Amino acid sequence: MPTTRRNLVRILLCLCSVLMAGAACAQGFSALVSPPRIEDNAKAGATYRNVIEISNVSGQAAHYTVKTADWTLKADSTVVFSDALSAGSCRPWVGIEAPDVHVAANGKRRYRFEVAVPADAPNGECRFAIMIEGDPEPTKDAVALPVSGRIGVIIYLTVGDAVAKLDVVGRKVQAVDGRDVPVLSVRNSGGAHGRLQGFIDGKDASGRSYSFVPATLPILAGETYDIALTPQGDNDDAPAPAIVYPLQLKGHLDSGAQRIDIEATFQK
Amino acid sequence: MTVGDGPARLALAFGIASVLTMRVAHAQEAGVAQAAPAAYQDRIIAPQQLQSLPPDEDELENSQGLPRSFHAEAIVSRTERGDDAFDEQGISAGGFWETPSWGAFSLDATLFHSDRERFDGLDEHGGGLGGTATLWQRDLFLDGGWRANNGLGVLNTPSSPLQRNQYRFYLPTVAFAGASSEWRNDRTGLLLQGSFGRAGIYNGTRVVGFDVAEGDVASLGAQWTWAPQWTGAASFLGTHGRIVPDDRGEAIFEEGDTQALYAATAWQGARDSVQLNLLASDGDRGGANGAWIDASSRRGRYLHNYGAYRLDPDLSWGALPINNDVEGAYYRLAYQYARWSWNASLDSIRSISGDGFDGTYATGFARYQASSTLGYGGSLNVRRSPDIAYSAQAFLDKRTAWGQTRLQVDQARDDGSSDSWQVSIDQAFPLRQGSRLSASLAYGSLAYNDQPGDAKTITASLYGGRDLSDRLSLDGSARWTHGDGLGAMRGTDFNLGLNWRFNPRWSMTAAFYQNQGSQRSPFILDPLVTETPFISMPRDRSLFLSVRYERSAGRPQAVLGGAPGGPTGAVGGSLFLDDNDDGVRAASEQPAANVTILLDGRYAVRTDSLGNFDFPRVSAGTHTLTVVPDNLPLPWFIDEAGAQRTVQVMVRQATRVDIGARRQR
């Protein structure tokens, strides 16, 4: 299955999961928050301001706790949030409108936040999340259990002209979705997150040529992630190509204005 | 999905996935969280330092009941067209409302008074009252699996999917004032369509009018599945009158009479498809028959399209001209994989009467995506009849921090008699939400078929829109052309609107429209391209002032949980003629007006003179936009990806969709 199509399937699965989660939480946690993600720029010495909107889609008034969190990506591309202040966190720059909000049944509430970037802040990326958390829900037996829902808005704020700087630091063949694909270990030594883009050409041991597309997972500043390269099928309906290793890749990928040359042999 | 969509969609998935992860993680670790060290305390912004928020328009809305919206507008205008100068005053109104058991209704209506002598209004004298009104009822569910769509007022004759699914020839619909009905059985796949009314022609600029002609229009059609993988269709269309250009280039109805019968059958396999079309017409020009067959085969990275056709002289369908007096065959091979996209085609065409085109037409196109930000390619079209004419094009697409740039060079030689060339640059700038801007600059020497000599012409264009403040916005297009030869185009075209929303429900718009007319591009050589015959319009200049009132209420079913209530956003965009086929609306590219856009197949609007459409209050979530390409000027068509697309509406965000119409080159 081509990468783009597989991404779409993943998105659909995610959406389905959200819907299921929403249904499951309908009795206690019925918040929608928009936008789900903010990616913007700020200047040192200036205050960046923005607004998110919290909607309560239940028929009952709701109370939500709002706070910030640090976050990072795990190797399996899942997000890990941290209430504790991480080293180098920019959350001390962040101000939020209120620690909690009440939203009427089927109502909505605009919620303001700001990031006061210090004048001496270096170029880089301010990365945090705004967490909206529902109250603990009692069960049928009126026993309060610490079960509630939370939802997070991820914010990337590039300060100054920080950019990503990606380098390939390793390579291997790894099973992804049940298929062995070439994987690059990519380190970001720049000040902002980046993504690999483009096509790279390869020829496998059977002599067949394919184009490979990198997973578009964001590579956070200072982190190293494994990025799978997916061979493209002949068309959307064609089965995924079966690669016969060793595989020779030669070409380049992009990240913004950066060109990353790749010439490597992948052996199982 | 393009490669460029990948990151955005993945980013969306990433955002959503992060939310999911968070919920699950928290549910599992909630007990542990209590034992965690003292949490970080956020800084709370002092109330007096909070930024002020603009008024929340939604707070004024009534959220009870099913969704409905209504708008009304009073308009005055002054227009100069050719040697005419006339005033018009009118009102327009429209809206959507959902009913529990009668489907969804959409209304689009205008009523205006004109003192133009050439305008035959309702009283059929010079000047008077005119206008248009259309009421749609869509998705009326009935017993037995039936679903009905009905229309009343100014409509276009309905077309079956097979009729629309054409590769080489297109059958235009006919605009009329009357009634239409479409019945679809989702269980059996049977589709029935019928319409009846008086023929007419759309007119107007910012305000759409409709001139009703003398003759009648009637259509009847059906499509059905007669065997697994096999579909059949049959349609009848009878029209009195024929649309032709008058001595000033404006469209008028002349006397005529056409009855035409269309029948088709199609087979759809996993990798192959074939469709046979038969058309027979009779009328004041005599009887004629036509048949054409189109097939396609997908083999790996290759797509083959091939077919043959014979269309008798004077073959007709409705009021607009269609291809006729031709027979021949075509073959097209297309390759698409990763960086490469190329195609080549060959048409062999013969005029049955000997009076039309006899010869061959060959095309070639290639595009290479060198990196995620750079692509380039070119095309070559050659027509031999027996003189050789050709057009060639080279282009480069580059994405930078300044947006999307296309640099293009065109050259054409028309049957050895005259040369045309043009260098152009189109730039779409990346702007924040609420703003869009693209600019085009072109310089060249253009030779037109009907004009002696060639003309050095420079054209500069701007297209865009911007929110100047919370209440003030500007949108429109401007094109300046200067030529220095015989028959050269000169002057400035404008279509600018300044909108002032002085109250959440009230707004005022001042619009200025000026059009110097247009001519067929000398770079189009396809002998089978049938241009709309009245494309060369006289100079047209108008000034509009309007006051608009709009109100929305009600909510659709919520996106989550199924309970009533839910967040809303908006969907808007434009339909344009994608001249350079790059999918981006360039400033030099023309809008497509009066084309129907459907939201979720239920709510209908028509594009305005800028090609814009707008659905102001839409529930957050996934929706479908469908383009019904009635009134799209020939030879333009909407491809499969453009005709129906899924849009994601975010809370309080305006999702913008620009849809490009394509044409065979």
Image: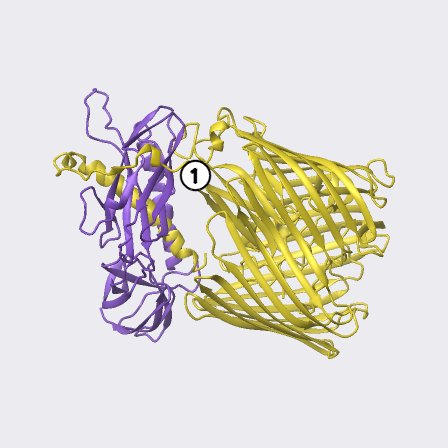
Chain colours: A purple, B yellow
Nearer-the-camera pick, A52 or B472:
B472
Q: Is residue B498 left or right of residue A43?
A: right
Q: Chain of mark 1?
A: B
Residue A148: percent from left, percent from top: 25, 32
Q: In the figure, residue B292 lies in which quadrant?
A: bottom right
Say above or below: B294 vs B385: above
What residue did someone put label 1 on?
B651
Quadrant of the snapshot with the C terminus of chain B: bottom right
Classify mark 1: residues with Cα within 10 Å, few (<14), some (14-19) or many (20+). many
Disc 1 marks a residue whose amino acid type is Val
Say above or below: B23 vs A237: above
Nearer-the-camera pick, A7 or B583:
B583
Q: Is residue B294 left or right of residue B19?
A: right
Nearer-the-camera pick, B197 or B285:
B197
Q: Is residue B12 left or right of residue B151?
A: left
User: Which residue corresponds to the image point at 65% horizontal and 65% vertical from the top-left?
Assistant: B459
Say above or below: A68 vs B171: above
